[in-house]
Amino acid sequence: MHAKESAAYALWQIYDLFTDGNRLVINGRFVRYLTAQDQRELARYQSKVAYWQGNLNEHIQHRINVGTNQYREAMNRAFGPGGSFHRAFTGPYWESQHLNTPPPTTLPPLPPELLVEVPVMPFPSPPAFCFR
């Protein structure tokens, strides 16, 4: 995060900013009355924060999906058909045992559409009246 973005995010985390009708309250302290323009700006800001949160959730899910695929690929290389663990058991005894057992199964990798990179959006700046 850039300095301006991190400052906006810190403000969002630290301050308990809410409105009570047309009253702006920050950390339990009445700050001022909001004009109609202020209320529209605050509504836009809140929708931007909600969109940012959705983007962050998608980014986190993407990172989880990438990790899941890496785990599945490693397990499949070791324990899947022809995997290193499976190949270690050779000889007549193991070949006779394999005749009576199904081949090992693997977990398929996730579809490519679940692995598309989701860039992180910058945190939106609060309306100017929040800094007054």
Image: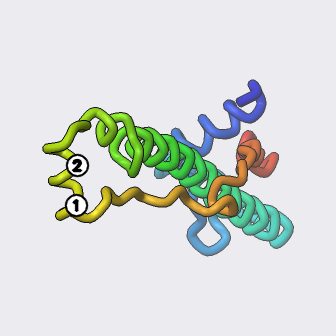
Say what secondary structure mark 1 lies in: helix
Q: Amino acid at mark 1?
A: Leu
Rendered position, 14 above or below 112:
above
Q: Residues within 10 Å of mark 1 (few under 14, many from 20)?
A: few
Say what secondary structure mark 2 lies in: helix
Residue 32 showing in the rendered view: no
Question: Residue 28, how many percent across, how many down?
Answer: 47, 51
Q: Are marks 2 and 1 in contact (CB under 8 Å)?
A: yes
Question: Residue 95, how many percent across, how many down?
Answer: 22, 48
Give the quadrant of residue 83.
Answer: top left
Question: Residue 120, how many percent across, how many down?
Answer: 71, 44
Outermost residue, right side: 37
Residue pointed to by mark 1 = 99
| Foreground of the two, 76 or 57 | 76
| Foreground of the two, 121 or 131 | 121
**Which quarter shows the N terminus?**
top right
Q: Amino acid at mark 2?
A: Glu
Residue pointed to by mark 2 = 95
- Distance from label 2 to label 1 (Cα)? 6 Å
Disc number at residue 132? Answer: none
